[in-house]
Each structure stands twice: as C-alpha cells, then as structure tokens.
Image (cartoon, rainbow, N blue to C red):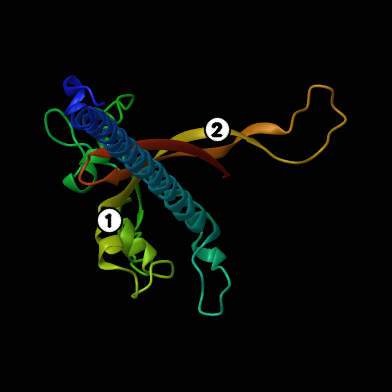
Amino acid sequence: MTNKKEKGFALVLSLVLLMAMSLMGGALIVISASDHQSNNLSDEYQQTFYVAETALLEGEKYIINQYLGPYKANGQRDSSKRQLVGNSTSLFATGTPPVAPSAIRSCFNSYVDIDRSTFKVLRGPDPDDPTSTANVDVHESKSYYDFLTSGIVQSGDSNREKKRMQKFKYEYFMTRVGAAPFKGSGTSIKKDATDASSDGMAYRVYGCGNFDSGKIIVALESTIVLPK
C-alpha cells in the first residue's frame, strides 16, 4: 500500500535534478565562452606578432635593397646605384613633446627607450615608389590585408575574413646607428690580427603590428650591420 506522505516526491526530485542540471549547463556555457574569448585574444595577439615580424622584414629588405642596388629591367642589380642610406638632416620627431607623424604614431609611442629629442629617421628613396629619385623619410604604415592581397588572400575569401584581416596594420621606420664592427673572412700571421673591424654600418629597424586601431600593439626591433 502506498504511503500518502510520499505523494509528489517524484515531482520534487525531478525539479531538484532539473535545477542542478541547469546550473551545471549554465556553468559549462560560461566556462566555454570564457575559453573561446581567451583563445580568440591569444590568436589575435599571435597574428599581431606575425604582422610585427613582417614589418621588421620589410624594413630590413629595404635597407638591403638599397645596399645591393635596384633591379634593372633584365632582373640584375644596378650596382652603380647602390648606397648606404643615411639619417635625415631634420628631426623625424616634431612637436612638444616630439612625436612621429600620425601615420605611425601608434607604433612610435610604444617605444620608451628612444630619445625623441634627437631621433632621426632614415632618409632614402620612397619605399612605395622605388623608381622615384626624391629622398624621403623612410617609414611605412600599411594595411596587412593590402600587403597580403598580392598573393595570399584571394578574391574568393569570405567577407568576414576580409574584415578581420583589415584590422591588422604593419608599421616600420628605421634609423642609422653609425659605424659598427663588421666581421669578415680572412687570415693573418700576426698574433694580434683580427677579422673584426669598424668597417660596417649599423641600422636599427623598428617594427609594429597593430590590431584594431591600437587594441593590441606588438613592438619589435632589430639591428642589421652592412659592410661599408
């Protein structure tokens, strides 16, 4: 015989279990959303780092191309136009306090180790127009999507991916540090002889990866030494 006091027990138990499962499901959703957001942030930071590396490579490539000389129509270098580009005669940073041109201000301001009162940008041929004979302050601020459209990003890519890639921008600028030891090959019978001498010219390249107008900025720098 069923005890009258047990009537409705199954309903109460069901409600308790439903509540417990709902709380567990809600907690899993919150944890999953948090992990997803964290993964997205990590991916965006990693991509921004790659963009900053691209900036360094583009800056280094510019200096090396100037040293080796521009390409001629036949694909060979024109050694008669090779040069070691120098600093500009005027300060790159202007204003009080000195700041870089607005095109690369977000990158420049991320560096705290630059003496802005004396900093001068590299001066040479226009990086956007290698055929130009006029010397300009060598710096570049460019959409990473525009950089990739030359071969990697195809026209069939989704509009969502295009909008995402357009949020990334790479920026670089350079300065000439001055004379530096350059280690070349060779031998000598003198005991105090060395193959390292101040026959090189050092350049410092500053590169930035910029995501979504400064939400993430990765700043990198490198030094390259070329023989005089």
Q: Which residue is mark 1?
A: 164
For the residues carrying marks 1 and 2, which lies nearer the camera in this image? Answer: 1
In the drawing, does residue 11 fall left or right of residue 28? Answer: left
Residue 185: % across, % down: 75, 41
Residue type for callout 2: Ala
The kind of secondary structure element at disc 2 is strand
User: Which residue is at the far left?
Assistant: 96
Residue at 14 percent across and 28 percent down: it is 97
Q: Residues within 10 Å of mark 1 (few under 14, many from 20)?
A: few
The image quadrant where one finds the C terminus is top right
The image quadrant where one finds the N terminus is top left
Above-or-below relation of 192 to 151: above
Tell me the tag on residue 222: none
Residue 61: % across, % down: 48, 54
Q: Nearer the viewer, residue 145 or 62?
A: 145
In the drawing, does residue 203 fall left or right of residue 173? Answer: right
User: Which residue is at the far top?
Assistant: 5
Residue at 29 percent across and 42 percent down: it is 89
Q: Nearer the viewer, residue 14 or 62?
A: 14
The kind of secondary structure element at disc 1 is helix
Residue 207: % across, % down: 37, 42
Mark 1 or mark 2: name the one nearer the start of the chain.
1
Q: Which residue is mark 2?
A: 180
Residue type for callout 1: Arg
